[in-house]
Amino acid sequence: MVAVGTGLAANLAALVALLAGLGTTVGLGPAAWAVGAACGVVVGAAVVRGLTWAGAAALGLADLVTLARVTLTCGVAALVAESFVRESVRPVVVVVAVAALLLDALDGRVARLTHSASMFGARFDGEADAFMLLVLSVYVAPAFGAWVLVIGALRYLFAVAGWVVPWLQDQLPDRPWRRVVAAIQGVVLAVAAADVAPRTLMLAVLVVALALLVESFGRDVLWLWRHRFSESVDVTGSPAAFRLRPP
């Protein structure tokens, strides 16, 4: 376990080093630096809030892996901001995004091996997925249409809907297919970002990916609606049993 302050300080240092490295290799303008730094600040605040919500005082090893993944996503966000100025950042966007996606397969395994699964870790992992999908959808949208932004925005629309419809904030049972769908979105968006497939084929794949995501959210909404009058499920002692949000 690592103290929150220590973990966030190390993460901030890593983010600054990443942005500096990207600035040296591909060049980052003021807007890109501002976006990357802002993402880092938001992530830090969200981690503190999430730990407070979960009643945790430290970050586990798996949480640090997820934090590293989010740091890479902040770098991708900076590159996406730079891409609106020049297109030459595409190869680096893809490389950094793929590195972050590969880490996505590691944090869960680390949590299981170290027996450190937690409610915070599960939620943090899901939010890290959602953040990457949002960033990549912003990058891909200019080439394939604004509708692609729905892939990145759906998680946040779900959260906003929860402010209006309280039962949408209830806990959800773990569903492996939800994680599979989230992984599919990341892979599809990364391939679209790489621009290595014929446009027509990529459009069709993006549509299928969005359909899968809508189905996953729809199934969760249906489950929550059916259980809207049920008492809250006590998951104390079984932190890995539930996730709070799709996908």
Image (cartoon, rainbow, N blue to C red):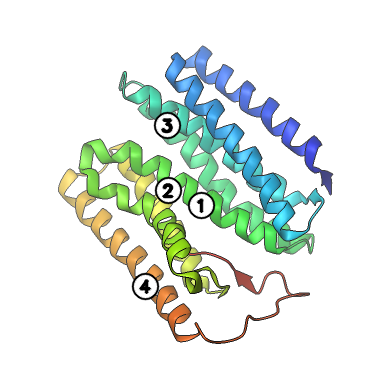
What amino acid is labelled 2 in the image? Leu
- The nearer-to-camera label among 3 and 2 is 2
What amino acid is labelled 1 in the image? Asp
Is any atom of residue 28 visible in this view?
A: no
Q: Is residue 65 above or below residue 228?
A: above
Task: Tell me the residue that label 3 is attached to.
Answer: 93
Real-space Cα distance between discs 4 and 3? 31 Å
Point out the tag, 2 or 4, that comes first from the N-terminus: 2
Residue 212, how many percent across, how many down? 33, 66
What amino acid is labelled 4 in the image? Gly
Task: Tell me the residue that label 4 is attached to.
Answer: 218
Mark 2: secondary structure: helix
Residue 195, how many percent across, how many down? 28, 37
Q: Are marks 3 and 2 in contact (CB under 8 Å)?
A: no
Q: Are marks 2 and 4 in contact (CB under 8 Å)?
A: no
Point out the tag, 4 or 3, that comes first from the N-terminus: 3
Point out the tag, 1 or 3, that comes first from the N-terminus: 3
What amino acid is labelled 3 in the image? Val
Q: Are marks 2 and 1 in contact (CB under 8 Å)?
A: yes
Task: Tell me the residue that label 2 is attached to.
Answer: 133
- The nearer-to-camera label among 1 and 4 is 4
The structure residue drawn at horizontal position 21% and vertical position 43%, both measured from the top left corner, is 144
